[in-house]
């Protein structure tokens, strides 16, 4: 196992090396999966496994631990802790959760000789253990990364990890509660805070009540923003082998003809990409409520983010945010 210096805040890595690393990562599809040991978080990992089958996709498993979680006062020697953790043999909080995730991705046969292992450490927040990771890199360029990160709180750790990325998609497990947008900074779940603040797309993973569901339902409203989001999500569904259904909600019956034209345009756009549409649906009513109702039979509901700045979104609301909280199936907020 090679041990390399970490790349993160406060590193002495030359800026040119950091720029080169980020440029390489921008040519890959990178998925950040947040693991906390709950079954909900492993539901998210199962989505990542399904999405990340191609060689140009990397999966990063992240566990965030509080600063100095008993290590300084517990008499554990930091050097020994780091060495043992880099071998993934020490039962520190989060290690067994990440190891289970690796086992799920590797399967019964484990990782073959075609994979190399690179371990790294970064000092963080003055914590005796800091940030540590092990990267398993295949000879074709694909990576699986286990990251144990230190942060003041979990949501901050996840968002800070994005800055060290970048990432195309963050996957979170289903939260235990969901507040209104105006209250999302106060007592909100980790998943809700990340969904509100993350710069990239966020998938809130929920197991479907009746199995896999019937594919991905992509919501469009005719704006350039939603159509671009549709194109990106349709490619994702295509690579997952999932059928695509497009939905447009008309607020009033008089708007139904316009909604139908939006669906026609959407279907034509996807046809040019050689992606077929299994069905095109029109619903009438309040958009968030109709999306949740129509999407209950699907494995994933995809809704484009409002595109509003954060402060404006807090006071005017966002359909994607409300759908994430109300749906009983997985929701992808596309940014």
Image: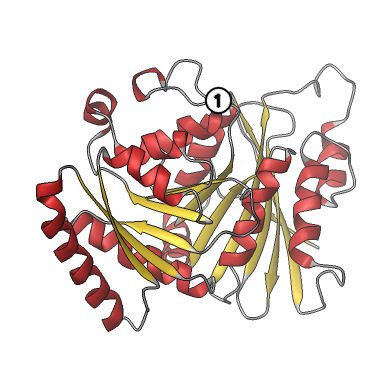
Please give the residue where the numbered disc 1 appears in the rendered image.
177
Furthest residue toward front: 253
The answer to whether one can see residue 335 in this image is: no
Quadrant where the N terminus lies?
bottom right
Q: Dividing the picture into quarters, in which one does residue 318 lie?
A: top left
Of 63 and 252, the residue lying toward us: 252
Residue 320 x, y percent position in the rendering: 35, 41
Left or right of residue 34, residue 71 in this image = right
Residue 186 x, y percent position in the rendering: 45, 15
Residue 76 x, y percent position in the rendering: 89, 27
Q: Dividing the picture into quarters, in which one does residue 224 lie?
A: bottom left
Q: What residue is shown at x 56% (from left), y 50% (from top)?
A: 7
Eyeballing the image, is 189 above or below 269? above
Q: What residue is shown at x 24% (from left), y 44% (from top)?
A: 307
Q: What residue is shown at x 48% (from left), y 45% (from top)?
A: 162
Left or right of residue 109, residue 64 in this image = left
The answer to whether one can see residue 92 in this image is: yes
């Amino acid at each position: 196992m090679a041990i390399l210096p970490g790349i993160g805040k406060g590193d002495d890595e030359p800026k040119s090396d950091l720029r080169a690393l980020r440029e390489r990562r921008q040519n890959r599809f990178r998925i950040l999966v947040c693991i906390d040991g709950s079954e909900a978080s492993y539901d998210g990992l199962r989505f990542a496994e399904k999405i990340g089958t191609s060689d140009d996709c990397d999966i990063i498993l992240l566990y965030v631990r509080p600063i100095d979680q008993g290590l300084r006062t517990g008499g554990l020697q930091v050097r020994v802790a780091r060495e043992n953790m880099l071998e993934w043999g020490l039962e520190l909080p989060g290690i067994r959760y990440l190891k289970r995730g690796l086992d799920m991705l590797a399967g019964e046969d484990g990782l073959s000789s075609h994979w190399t292992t690179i371990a790294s450490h970064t000092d963080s927040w003055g914590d005796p253990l800091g940030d540590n990771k092990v990267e398993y890199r295949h000879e074709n360029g694909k990576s699986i990364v286990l990251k144990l990160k230190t942060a003041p709180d979990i949501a901050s750790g996840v968002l800070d990890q994005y800055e060290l990325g970048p990432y195309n998609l963050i996957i979170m497990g289903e939260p235990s509660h969901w507040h209104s947008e105006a209250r999302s900074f106060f007592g909100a779940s980790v998943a809700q805070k990340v969904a509100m603040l993350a710069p990239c797309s966020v998938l809130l993973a929920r197991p479907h009540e009746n199995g896999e569901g019937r594919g991905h339902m992509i919501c469009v409203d005719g704006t350039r923003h939603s159509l671009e989001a549709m194109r990106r999500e349709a490619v994702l569904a295509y690579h997952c082998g999932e059928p695509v259904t497009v939905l447009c909600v008309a607020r009033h019956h008089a708007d139904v003809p316009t909604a139908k034209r939006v669906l026609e345009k959407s279907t034509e756009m996807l046809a040019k990409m050689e992606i077929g549409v299994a069905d095109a649906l029109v619903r009438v009513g309040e958009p968030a409520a109709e999306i949740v109702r129509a999407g209950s039979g699907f494995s994933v509901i995809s809704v484009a983010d409002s595109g509003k700045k954060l402060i404006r979104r807090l006071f005017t609301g966002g359909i994607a945010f409300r759908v994430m909280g109300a749906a009983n199936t997985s929701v992808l907020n596309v940014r």
